[in-house]
Structure formats: C-alpha cells, structure tokens
Amino acid sequence: MTHYHKSSKPLVWLPFAAGGVTSAMVLPVLMLITGILSPLGLLPDGALSYERVHAVVAHPLGKLVLLGVLLPSLWHGAHRFRCTLQDLGVSSHGGRQMVMLGCYGFGFLFTILAIAALAAIW
Amino acid sequence: MSTPTTFTLEVLRFDPTTDTEPYYQTYQVPYDEDWVVLDALTWVKDNLDSSLTFRWSCHMAVCGSCGMQVNGTPVLTCKAFLRDYVPATVKVEPLRNFPIERDLVVGLDGFIDRLEAIKPYIIRKDDKPIDEGAYVQLPKQLKRFKHHTLCINCLLCYSACPQMGLNPDFLGPAALALAHRYNLDSRDEGRRERQKVTGSAEGVWECTFVSACSEVCPKGVEPAGAIQEQKVQNSLDWFLDRLVPGRKAP
Amino acid sequence: MSQSYKPVFPKTWWLQSAFYTRYMIREASSFFVATYSALLIIGLWRLNDGPQAWDGFLHALQSPFAVLYHLLALLFTLYHTVTWFAVTPRTMPVLVGDDFLPAAPIVIAQYVAWVVLSLGMIAVTVWL
Amino acid sequence: MPSSHPTDLTLIEADVAIVGAGGAGLRAAIAVAESAPDLKVALISKVYPMRSHTVAAEGGAAGVAKSNDSLDNHFNDTVTGSDWLADQDCIDFFVERAPKELVQIEHWGCPWSRDPDGSVAVRPFGGMKIERTWFAADKTGFHLLHTLFQTSLKYPSITRYDEVYTTDLLIEDGRCTGVLAHEMRSGKALAFVAKSVVLCTGGAGRVFPFTTNGAIKTGDGMAMAYRAGVALEDMEFVQYHPTGLPGTGILISEAARGEGGILVNKDGYRYLQDYGMGPPDPWPRKKAMELGPRDRLSQAFWQEQQKGRCISSKWGDVVHLDLRHLGAKKINERLPFIRDLAKSYVGVDVTQQPIPVRPVVHYTMGGIASNIHASTSLPGLYTAGEAACVSINGANRLGSNSLAELLVFGRVAGENAAAFARSAPAISHSNALAQAAAARARVEQMVDGSKGTESATTLRNEMYQAMESGCGIYRTAEALEATCAKLGELRQRWKNVAVNDKSWVFNTDLTQALELGHMLEIGECMAHAARLRTESRGAHQRLDHTQRDDQNFLRHSMAWRQGDEAPRIDYKDVVITRSQPAERIYGGEAK
Ligand SMILES: Cc1cc2nc3c(=O)[nH]c(=O)nc-3n(C[C@H](O)[C@H](O)[C@H](O)COP(=O)(O)OP(=O)(O)OC[C@H]3O[C@@H](n4cnc5c(N)ncnc54)[C@H](O)[C@@H]3O)c2cc1C
Ligand code: SF4
Ligand code: F3S
Ligand code: FES
C-alpha cells in the first residue's frame, strides 16, 4: 500500500493560481507594448521614456501593482514549467529534484531581484 | 454505401502463464448496427475463442466493469457502438496505466487501496440516532455535490490521465472526486481528516489539470473540477492553519 | 506472486492525441510567462541604473531575435489566457439558488475585464 | 512461477463468511461488524462489490415515509401484490423495519432525492396505494450499492475477497461451516472455514435469454444451497418487467410510469383499460392503469400481441411508453438515466418520441427457502436478498420492495449469523476439508482433464430456448413437459462440457461453464414447479388452468434436489395472519 507523504505544495500553488490570473489578464498586453509595439516604433515617441516609466515605478501604487503582477506570474511560470519538464519525461527522483531546484530557484532568485529593484527605485 | 457484413476486430492478448509480452490477435466478426464493442467480444468468446478474457456484467453502462481502450480512447465497451467505428478496424486494448492481468483484464488493487485511503464515508463527531429520522438536506445542498456521486469506478479517467502514467503513486481522478463528494456533503464533517491523504504529495498536487479525466468520463462526474476545487480548499486550509492562532489540522 | 504485465508509459505520450498535444502547448506557455516576467524584472534593474541603461534595454528589445521571442511569447500567452478563462467556471463553480451558474456568463465576464484592461493599458501608454 | 496447478487448498479462517457483496451481502457484512466488532468477516464476491447487480436498480426502495401513509397500507399492498402467496408475518416485520433501514442508509450518505423542504422525497410505484418509494433520481440501486460499499470500508473486521468465485458449501456435522472458492486471478483454491455462512448471491434471471439481469446473475448461491440439501422455494414465479428495451432487454424503470408515463399500442390507445386497470385518467392514479402490478401489465402486453395490436419494430413486437408530456425539466431531474439509456440504445429522445418497450425477465421471486430470521434448514446457513425466498414477494414482487428487502433481511442475516457464530460450539474441519478437496478436484478436472465435447454456447442456447418456450408469461402443461425433459437432458450433457481455456489465470471459460451448470439446475426447478402448479397466480399464468386455486395451491412450492433425477417438489403452507385471500382488484375500484 502506498504511503502518503506530507506536502507543502500550497506554498507554491496559491501563487501559481494567482499568477494564472495575472498572467492571463495582463501579460499579453504588456508583451505587446514592450516587446512588439515599442521595438517596432509603433508607439508615440517617448511613450516608454525613462522619465515616464521611472515615475510609474517610483510611485508606491505602481510598485504595488508591479509586485502583484510580476511575482505571481513569475511563480506561475516557474511552477508550471517544472511540471512541464516532468511531463516531458523527467521521472527519476534525482531528475525531479534537479528540475525542482532549477525552477523554484529561478523563481526565488527573481523574486529577490524584483523586490530589491523596487526597493531601490524611488 | 452498402453496410458491411463483417469487420476486423483486433484485440490485445496476454496470458502470463504462456506469454512474456502482449500481442495482437485479429478476428473477423459479423457486423450488426445495433451491436456495441462488448457484443463483438462476446461473440468471439462464444463462437471463435473461449479463452478471450474480459470483464463485463450489466450491459447498461452502470456497473463500470467493461472499460477498455478502443482505437486508443478509453470507453465503456457496452456503450461503444460498432457503427461509430466500422468499416475501420476496431482495436481493443486494456485500460492504460494499470498492470495487465490477462488479455483485457487489468489489476485494480491500486485503485481499491486509493478508495480506502480517502475514507469515502460520512465522518461526524456525533452520529444522529436512527429514531430521529433523516437529516434535512436542501435540494441546493444536494445539488452542490450530486454530480460527484455519479462515479461508477469504471477507471476510464485513470486510463486517460497522463499523470497516472508519469507518477504511479498519484491518487488519481476518481478517488479524489469521491473525496470531494464527501467533503461537500452537508452531512459530513470529515474534510480535514481526508486532507491528510488528498493534500499529500500523492494527492491533488500531482494533477496538472490535463482534464482528460473529465473528457472521457461517461457519467459527468467532473473529476478535474473536483480536484481544482480541492487545491483551492486545501491551500486555504494550509495557510489558515499557519496564520490563525489555535487553528490546526487534526 | 505478481505475474501481471506492466506496460511502459511512453515519453511521447503527448503526441498520441490532439487533446494531449493542446495540453502540452498550454503548459509550454509557462516558459514564456516565466522568462518574460524575469525579463521585466531585469528591466527594472536597468531602470534603476539610470536613463542610459534603460535606453540600452529598450534598444536591446529591438533586435529581431527579441521581437521574435515576444511574438512567440504573445501567442503562447494568449493561448494560456483563452484556456485559463475557459476553465475558471470549473475551478470555482458558483451556486445561485438551486442551480450552478452556467459557464458562459463567467467566461464572458472575464473577457470583458480583459479587453477593458488591455485597451486601458494601451491608452495609458499612448496618451498619458 | 504461475500457479498452473494450484492444487493445495489455502485455508482461510473467519467467523462469518458472506458470499456475495451486492446490496444484501454488504448490508449483512456491516451488520456483523456493528453487532459483533470482534468477529472476523470474510466477504467473498465473484466481482468487485460495486459491479454487483444491485447497481442496476433504478426506480427506488419502498418504506413508509410520510404521514398520509401507514404500515398497514404497505402490508396490504404487498400481500395483494403477492397474490396472497407471501408469508404475512414476514411482511409485517419487513414493512416495520424498512423505513428505519432507509433512514440508516441516509445517515450513511445515500444521496436520496429531496423535497423542497429538505426531507426525503417519495414517488408512486406500481401496485402501491400511496407514494412511498424513496429514490435517488433513477439510479437508486447504484447509489445504494456504492453507499453500502463505501461505508463497509470503515470496518476493520471486514476482509474482502474480490473476484473470488465460490463453488460449494462445506458441511460438517449437519452444519454449514464454510465454502470452497477460487481466486480468479490465480486460480488458487481457497477453503473458507467459518462458524456461519451467509449466501447473498442474487437472482437467476440469466437462465432466460432476454433479461434485465447482468451477466453475473446466474443463481450460483441458489444452486449451491440446493446441492447442499436446502430446498428452493416458489421457483416457478419469475417476474417479467413490462417495460424493457427491445433488443438489449435494458430496463426502463417503473419510475417512468410513477412519474406519469403512459403505455399505448399501435393505435395510440391506452390498452391497459381493457384489462381491468381503468379508468384511463390523464394523471397517474395509484394502483391503476400504468401503475398496476408488473404481472398484470406484462400479461396485458401478451394479450395485445395475440390481438395484433402491438407495433412492429426491427426488434419484433413492442408497445410505446410515452413520457413526452412530462417535459424536459422533470425528465432531466427525475429520469436522467432513462433519457440517456433510451438515447444510446434505441436512438430515442424521450422528450420528443415515445420509447419502444416490451416485457423482459426481471426478478426471481423464488429462492433459497428461508424465514423471518434469514436462516435456512441447514444450521449455520443464512441467506438474504434476491437469492433468498423469505417470502415477502409471493407470486409477484412489487417494484421497489426488493431494495428495501435486501436491507432489512441483509441486516437480519448478518446479525443472526453473528449470533450463531458466537454461540455455536467449535467444530473440527476434517470433513469439510475433505469435501473441499473433492470439490476442488472436480473443478481442476474441468480445466486440466481431457477435453469435453459439449460446447457451452450450444448448451446455453438450448437452455434459453427451453426456458423461453416453457416458462414464459403464459404457460401450458405441454410446453412445460417439453421444457422439463430438455433441461434434464441438458444437465446430463453438461457433465461433458468443454472448457477450452487451459490457463488458471482469470479463466472465465471455466466460470461460465460452472455458472451454466448452476443455471441448468435452477431452470429445472422453475420448470418442474411450474408444471406442477396447475393454477394461475401472480406471475405464474397457465393457459390450461386459468383460475387461482386456493384450495390446492395456497402453498409454497419446495424443490429438493434428487441427484441426477428431476427435483422433487412438495409444498409448504403460507403464513396468513390477518389478510384472508381475496380477489386482487386494481384500477378504479382498488382500495
Ligand atoms: C435492472 C434492474 C432494476 C431493478 N430496479 C429495482 C428497483 O428500482 N427497486 C427494487 O426494489 N428492486 C429493483 N431491482 C431488483 C433488485 O435490484 C435486486 O433484486 C437486488 O439488487 C438484488 O440484490 P442482491 O444483493 O441480492 O444481489 P446482487 O446485487 O445481484 O449481488 C449478488 C452478489 O453475489 C455475488 N456472487 C454471486 N455468485 C457468486 C459466486 N459464485 N461466488 C462469489 N460471489 C458470487 C456477486 O458477485 C454479487 O456481489 C432491479 C433489478 C434489476 C435487474
Ligand atoms: S470519474 Fe468518471 S471516468 Fe472516472 S471512474 Fe468515475 S465514472 Fe469512470
Ligand atoms: S486528467 Fe489527470 S492531471 Fe488532473 S485534471 Fe484529470 S486528474
Ligand atoms: S458492462 Fe457494466 S458498464 Fe459496461
């Protein structure tokens, strides 16, 4: 009979679920603006100028929104990508440990970076 | 187009006493537009090869015995009409993600263990005496979980769920849907008790919401939804246990 | 005394049916969600480093490689959006009176919110 | 190393061995576990419990529930329905216990359908004066079985032996002390030795070709008890359900008529009014028209067929069951399974078209002779459910009484078997084990021995034909004699039956051959008891003896096995306490 092991998955699962919503709602338009419209010059000049973007990020409300969108999306991606690698056939215990370390490590690293960056910009 | 008079039935065979590997065998079987795949298997057993082995009983899609892979998809063979496949070859294989005992018969021990593990019965602190009559349960309280009670344990969902194949310890869709069914029952108080299993590493977290389970389920049990709801509930309980002083899992 | 046969689960399972393949595409969107989020965080650091660094960042985004990446990211993430909205009614069914709320209004409400939000953000970027 | 010659008997000791894990067997197991938690229960079933045929019951379970009803009403309906052939002390006991058992199942989580105030809803059923049939949409048996199975997992004293096929009862000192079985997945022989044994192996509708019964309903338990010297009671009474789907025999529940469905012939005429069931009210009137008892409705179909007033379909003669006027909402809420079945198996959307139906073999009123204590003439042997004949069903069972019966008497069987196990003196198993070894050798011979020459399929088809021609809705001396002779012959030929599958792993060729042997014995009891009952009563209608004959036949038939000879039939008086036999009146005059 199988033994059932304790799990701390809720710790990543709630951010994953929240990130599912934020990434579905917000990321497409952000990608469009930063990754396509702006590089192709389809936005008015200065739309993403240093001053304007800095003003948004420096504002407490801006920080809050950025944090609320970026971190859940990040964890959503990290957690789901871990599952995807398993889906693609990483099945050994060691392999799964590595994947977990890689994905969640990535999430952890960029969480710190995001918080530090936002804390630095005023 | 003229209706065919016979068709080709291809069946996976395996007998552990003589074979080391399964192999395919084909039969020519008379075609009848009213027949289901199970009727064709029965015809073979009665007329060509009495050693062909498969389970069935009710022939009305309710006992859950006759689930098999037909042309790659898990179905109840007593409800899978030949007219939906023929003239193509009809290929019958045992359900996936289970050990093959013989021919189309798979081993269910793992599933039965899982059923027992999730404690599929009413759990209460105090039982109501029989003399006091039935519990009051409003139609909307019944509605809340009714669809999750419809599982016939046919295990098509286990055959369809890739996470079962990738992680054989996963509790799987039907067992988790059943746990949810009891959790949601207005007469039950056992949710926290069941979470020890449903919230374990082998529980809801192994599901990646592939949804193939709900897709193939012949009874509308919606195990995929039941699992997602439990992820939400289990996460909330987990956090509340850690944030609210005095709140603890049993 | 187990003598049963245990079939091996193929690593290529997700190519066996269109249903599984669509699932895999949906899951693959996570690569872009994760990397794009990280990219924006790197952007924040560039922003912190001053106007020049920021301009360099914007410039880097103009490389064909970057544009291609964002195009792919956008497609995959849009697929994620569609699938996510579609399953919400199943993750959180709502009972109203004696019946569940049908799926359509929940899904439509999400799209309305999504369109408003997206247009709003474009408007803010362009005009404010 | 596969166990290809699993000759050694594996001995399994238990206090109570229960054969059959359908509704009755599970209820019995729980009753033992609750009344005597220290006793070890072995629950043996040839299929996983949730595959048992209780799962197929659709309509509901009867028990007095509402204030407009009374135990007396339920008693009177059941006695009348039985054509006075049931034992009235047992019926009194049954109607009194039924509501409590149904509440118990509710406490265990059964999702009964509800009224708006949250109380359990009830619906009308055929032959019942007042609505008292508890239901869970139209999947009552399914919910009941799964509730019992899941609840049974709670009790550590119950050990299940799933997919273990029982072949024989073991007897020691005139007491039943166990069963011989084999594990299907390995072929391994298991000798269960127990202080008491409960048979809950279900009915035997599979002796007929056209039946609502699943593949497992082959009367194994009846045959085992019969071979062990217990009588089979009232075997001539076989219920035809009036509304089965043509072709498959899939049941369209009486609930369809309880909710207001009507039956019409090819002229769109509600023909039941011609058979004393009128008036044809537009609403469902209890005990009238479509809510008459099953025997009368099935007989009316036969009469219509003789008059050429049925509808011819590609599956032969049918009549139409029309639900269209009920509307989609009610149908979806109360009859979702019926809608699904009709759509899948005859391509009919019941909200748009009538359903083609015809009578189909459904239930064996007869069974292992037992009593109000669920015990039999063999000490230590108990029985309940469709395998048993208590008798509360007499010559015709009322729909929805049998789910209640299996709860009431399943529990009694479990409690009494537990009490017996406690009080019975210990006993050695030497004799029983010798029997087991001999019985096992016979089974092994079928597989390992040289090949028989009789094809099981041929024998089975000949049995089907014999049963259908002799033991149908209407019977005659002539046809019955032919049937009896044929079955005697088939029983001899069966001894030479071929088992071509030589593997011991999940050998269904073997189990089917064993089941066929059981069915032939049971068919023989049915045919002989029917031949000798020269009257018409309930489900037993003779064209050559059209009247009920209380003078000679207000008695239960008892079939005793006589080795290779035909069974000996004798009779036992019916217990009558307060309802003297009278005419059975249905329709407008029914009270
Ligand atoms: C389609 C249908 C609809 C019905 N609807 C209703 C209804 O609405 N209301 C109502 O009251 N009644 C209804 N009935 C009747 C009722 O369902 C049955 O009489 C009742 O369920 C029988 O239950 P049981 O426990 O006696 O037997 P079953 O449920 O048939 O169980 C028999 C058990 O015995 C086991 N068994 C048999 N032989 C062996 C063996 N040799 N070795 C080991 N195990 C063995 C089987 O594995 C199984 O577990 C219906 C019947 C049918 C067929
Ligand atoms: S959830 Fe559906 S598919 Fe899975 S076992 Fe139950 S009925 Fe079958
Ligand atoms: S298919 Fe499997 S992954 Fe989850 S949603 Fe169903 S259990
Ligand atoms: S035979 Fe019962 S579900 Fe198919």
Image (cartoon, coloured by chain):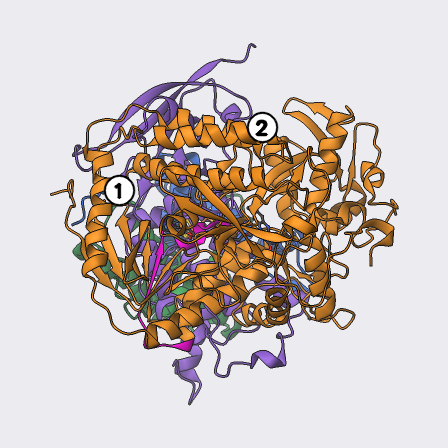
Chain colours: A green, B purple, C blue, D orange
Q: Is residue D233 magenta?
A: no
> Residue shown at 21%/62% (left/top)?
D429
Query: Where residue B23 sits in the image (x, y, percent)?
Result: 24, 28
Q: Is residue B229 left or right of residue B54?
A: right
Magenta span: D35-53
Front position among marks 1 and 2: 2
- Do discs 1 and 2 belong to a common subunit? no
Q: Choose top left, top right, bottom left or bottom right for residue B239.
A: bottom left
Element class at badge 1: strand
> Residue shown at 76%/49% (left/top)?
D291
Tell me the amino acid under the disc marked 2.
Answer: Ala
Location of mark 2 (residue): D479
Location of mark 1 (residue): B101
Element class at badge 2: helix
Position of the C terminus of chain D, as image quadrant, is bottom right
Q: Residues within 10 Å of mark 1 (few under 14, many from 20)?
A: many
Q: Choose top left, top right, bottom left or bottom right for residue D544.
A: top right
> Can you say whether D157 is above or below D226 in the image?
below
Residue furthest bottom in the image: B246
Query: Where residue D453 sits in the image (x, y, percent)?
Result: 29, 23
Query: Where residue B146 sits in the image (x, y, percent)?
Result: 58, 59
